[in-house]
Image (cartoon, coloured by chain):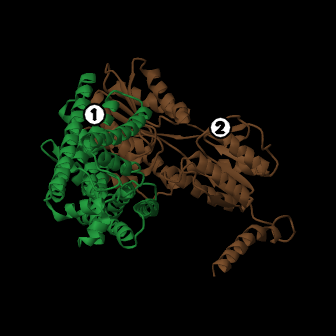
Chain colours: A green, B brown
Amino acid sequence: MNPIAAKAQEKKYFSFDFQIIVLVGVLALVMIISAVLTDKFFTYPNIMNVLQQVAMIMLTGSAATLLMISGNFDLSVGMVLAFTGVMHAFMSKNGIPTNVSMILSILIGSGFGLINGYLVAFLKITPVIATLGTMYAARGLAYIIAWVDGGANVTTGLPIDFEVFGRSMVGSVPVFLIIVFIIIAFFYFVYAKTNLSKYAFAIGGNNRAAVLSGVKVSMVILLLYLFVGTLTGFAGMTLASRMGTGAPNVGADFHFDVIVAIVLGGTSIYGGEGSFLGMILGALIVGFVGNALNLLDVMFFYQIVVKGLILLGAVLLTRKIKDTIG
Amino acid sequence: MKKLLIVLVALTMLAAFTVPVFSGGQGETGGAKKDLVIGKIPITMEANYHQAHVKHLISYAKEQYGAEVTVIDGAFSSDVAMSAVETFIAQGVDGILLHSIDEKVIDSMVKESHRADIPIVTFYIPTASRSVPHLQINEAETSFQMGVAAAKKWNEWYPGDQIYIGVVDYLAVEIVQKHRTGPFIAGVLSVDPTAQVVSKLEGSASVNKAMEAMQDMLQAHPEVNIVYGANADHALGALAALENAGRGKAVDGKCLTEIVVGTDGTEGELLKVYDPTCSMKITQGLQPAVNAKAEMDMLMKIINGQTPRDEWLELDTYDLFISYWDTPIEEAQEFIEYQYFSDVNLKEAIASK
C-alpha cells in the first residue's frame, strides 16, 4: 500500500479508536454521576431495565449503522416497528399460531425493507423522501388494522402465549434480550469481517469509485435496507409481546432514537465512516441518561432538551476529534 | 411544447380559481333543501374514545337531524386543527364541533369561524375567553371518586401502610392535571392525608413510553402502591411494566402490591379491571355516545336560534365510575357494547385466560 494511503488509513482507525475511548469515558461519567446522585441507579434490575429499553434501538441500529455508513438512512423504522407489532397482535388474534405470526411479522418488516431498498437503490429516490413515504404508509396501515380490529389498539382476544416471548426469563435475564444480543453480535461480525461492510464504506465514501470498482451498489443498498426492515420487524414483534398489545402509537420517536445512537457513536450522516461499537455506546449513553433523569424525577421537558443537546454535542465532539487528529 | 404546457397549466389554474365563482350553490337559489353539513374536529383519531365519539356523532346527526358530518383529525396539534377549521369554513359547513388542545388558539379558531358566520361549539377544552357554548366532561368528580376508592381499599387491606402514589401522566396538558390527575390525588389525600406522590412521569399517550416510564419509576420508587394512568394507554403500559417486574397481581380481587387505576374505560382496561388476578381495579368510563349527542344537540340549538352562538354556556357530562368491587361486570359489558361498539364478552374473555 502507498505510504500516504497507509498513514491516512492509520489516522482514520486511530481517530475511531480514540472516539470509542471518549464514548466509553462519557458513558462511565454518566454512570458514575448517576450512581452518586441516586442509589437506585447501580442495581441489577435497573441496569437490566435500561438494557431492555435500549435493546430495540441497538438491534435496529445494528443494521442501520451500516446503512448510514453507505450514505443512506431509514426514517420509517418507528412506524414499521408499530405496524409489525400491530400485525403480530392481529394475526395471533385471528387464528394464526403465535410462533408463525412472529415469523410473519418479521417478514413484514423485511417487506418494508425491500420496498425502501428498491425505492432508493433502483428507482433512485432520495432516502429521505422514500422512507418518509413508507413511514406514513406504515403508520396509516397500523391504524387501519387496529380500526378494522375494532379500536385504537389490538388488545383483546389475544392468545395466552402472545406474551410468552416478550416476558420469558432465563434466570433473571429476559429471553428476548439474550436473542437480541446474539443478533447484535452477529451483525458486529458482519460489520467487522465481511465484504458487505467494506462495500458499505466504499459506497458511502465515494459512490462513483465503488461503482467503477465493480461493487454492485444497488444490491448492497437493497440488502442493507432489507436488514434494517427485518430487524425492525423483529423489534416490533418483540415489543408487542412485551406490552401484551399491538399499539399503532408506539415508535413515534424511534427513528430519532436510532439516528441519535448512530450519530453519537461517530457515524457520519454523509456516509463513508462510522462505528458499530460507537452506536452501541451511543445507545447506552442516551438510555442511561434518560433513565437517570427519570430516577431523579426530572421533568420530562428537560429530558427532551437533554436529548437534543446530546445529539448536538456528539456531532461537535466528532468534528473536534477529526480536526484534532485528521 | 414547453410554451404549450405553460399555457395549459395557467389555464387549468385559472379555471380552478374561477369556476367556483360561476358555478351554482353560492347563494340560495331555491330548489331542494340542502342537508346540514357539520364539521367535526376531534383532538385525535388515534384513541378508542375519539373513534367511538365520531362514530356516534355521525349516526346521531343523521338520524336526529338529517345532517352529514365531515371529520378532520386534529392530530393533537393546534395548527392542524386551525387548518381544519379553515377547510370547513371554505367548504361552507353549517356548524363546527371542535376539540383542540390550546385555549388561546381555540379563541382564534372561533373568531375565524364566526367571521364566516359559522357557529362553533367547543368540547373538553374551552376558549380562553369563554366566549362560546362549551361541552365539558366533568371528570374531576369521577377522578376524585377513584382516588377515594383506591385509598379506602388499600387502607382496608393493609391498615397502617403508607400510601405512595405514582402517576403516568400527560404533563403538558393542563386540563388533564385539572380534571384527572389533580382530583385523583386529592381523592386519595381526602382519605389518607399522609399519602405521598412519589413520582409523576410522562406517558406521551403511548403504551411503550408508559411502560418504560413505569419501569424507571419502579426502580426509583419500588414502594409505590397506587398507580394512576391518565389514560388507558398509560394505565395499560404501567401495568405491563408491573407485570414484567413480577407485580401487577391480585388474588380474588385483592391487590397484592399495588392498585392500578386507569382512565377511559376501554375494552383492554375492563378486561384487566374484571380479572380477579390483576391489580388494575378501577377506571372511569368516558361516554362517547353521551358526549356526541350532547355536543350535536348544543350545536343544533345554536343553528336553530335557540342559543346565542357567542355567549358562554357550559354543559357538563359525566364519566362512569367503574370498579371491580362496586360495578357489576354486566354493567361494564353494557357500557362497552353501547359506548364502544364492542363485541367482546368480558366474562368469557377473562375466563379463557
Residue B165's x, y, as percent?
38, 28
Q: CA distance from mark 2 to mark 1?
A: 45 Å
Residue A266 in sight from this viewpoint? yes
Residue receiving disc 1: B256
Up-down relation of residue B300 to residue A202 (above or below): above
Residue A185's x, y, as percent?
15, 53
Residue B204, image quadrant: top left
Question: For the residue marked with disc 1, what is the amino acid?
Answer: Leu
- Judging from the image, mark 2 belongs to the subunit labelled B
Residue A202's x, y, as percent?
25, 62
Up-down relation of residue B123 to residue A87 (above or below): above
Name the residue: 30% across, 37% down. B215
Residue A178's x, y, as percent?
16, 50
Q: Are marks 2 and 1 on the same chain?
A: yes
Q: Is residue A30 left or right of residue A73?
A: left
Q: Is residue A144 left or right of residue B72?
A: left
Q: Residues within 10 Å of mark 2 (few under 14, many from 20)?
A: some
Name the residue: 41% across, 40% down. B203
Precedes in sequence: disc 2 or disc 1: 2
As drawn, the residue found furthest toward the bottom would be B1
Residue B272 in sight from this viewpoint? no
Question: For the residue marked with disc 2, what is the amino acid?
Answer: Lys
Residue receiving disc 2: B104
Q: Which mark is residue B336?
A: none
